[in-house]
Image (spheres, grey):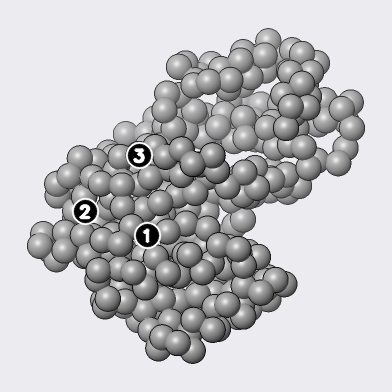
Amino acid sequence: MISIIVPVYQAEKLIEACIQSVLDQTCQDWELVLVDDGSTDSSGIICDRFAEEDKRIHVFHQENKGVSEARNMGIMNASGEFIAFLDSDDRFEPDMLSKLLSAAYEHKADSAGCGHMNAYSNGRRAAEGAPLPSGVYGPKEIGDAIVRPLLRDRVEGVLFNGFIWKYLYSAEIIKNNQIRFSGAYLEDEVFLIEYFSLAKKLAVVDEPLYVYYINPVSVTRKYLKDFIDVFRHSLEQKRKLVLQYRIGGIDGWELHTCWAGLLIAVGNEFAPKNPVGFFQKRRNLIALCKNPLFKDCIRKMTPKGVVGNKDTVVKLIKAGQYTLLSLLYALKNRKR
């Protein structure tokens, strides 16, 4: 009934627990599609060993192409009625698949969603709710709760996260519409926007059924040398989807999205892994703010209600205080 797709890269310390969480499911009608994305550690060997022990586990090995292509490989080789995604450093709670599948079948829904549990390296855990309360929702509610926030609510207030692993997806919708992942970052948001522009009914179980481990060295915390190109690609994809699916009620979404992209770009520029020196980072910061991608959003919009330290970053960018902003980031990163 369910194809679970796991992209695997350099995950030898965590992949066994991830796979075991699938084996421990109360729902046993699944196949596990493990895509080894060119790992140079023992990840691929571990995956092969599990596949030898359980015929429901299928392993595909490919050269390193990134998480998007790994997930696409999984989609192409999935045979289940539904598709679920699981990251190699995370886990399913034992009853996740059974509860989501039951909700989908009971309400004849093409999708089901749940909450998740944030798990930190110090042992702390914090539950985060589903996108909607428990219940059943149609296209309008899906659009208001998922699609529009992924376009509009990117910088002001509490960010709506585009986590793909919170949902059970119709394989028919994905395959018939050739929905695929593209890009090295922000790919989840684009996938969700397209999928939920097509979904007709979503059943929600507002329980933390997925365990999301906050990894301090995940892609969101690394230095991405080509972030501007990645962001531009994501923005262009979103523009196409807005036109293709005639998504309304999102006035000003590009300004919000570009502000969010700028804040990520500034943080990325000052990431500890960026090898250039302080003064070059400051020059790069100024160049970012003058980049046509971000210049208009700085001039036309002042975000309100920005959460946390990002509010300070917004104010300093609006004031052109690039040296002070650079010094604050340098001081922050010295503590890491």
Asked if one can make out residue 249 in the rendered structure from this viewpoint, the answer is yes
Q: Earlier in the sequence, mark 2 or mark 1?
A: 1
Residue type (three-letter) at the residue carrying disc 3: Ala
Residue at screen point 68% across, 10% down: 319
Q: Residue furthest front?
A: 123
Rendered position, 18 above or below 1: above
Residue 252 versus residue 217: which sits nearer the camera?
217
Q: Which residue is mark 1?
A: 92
Specify the label residue 127 is tagged with: 3
Residue 176 visible within the image: no
Q: Which residue is mark 2?
A: 202
Q: How far, Cα to Cα, is label 2 from label 1? A: 20 Å
Q: Element at badge 2?
A: strand
Between disc 1 and disc 3, whose residue precedes? 1
Left or right of residue 123, residue 81 in this image:
left
Where residue 332 sits, quadrant-wise, is top right
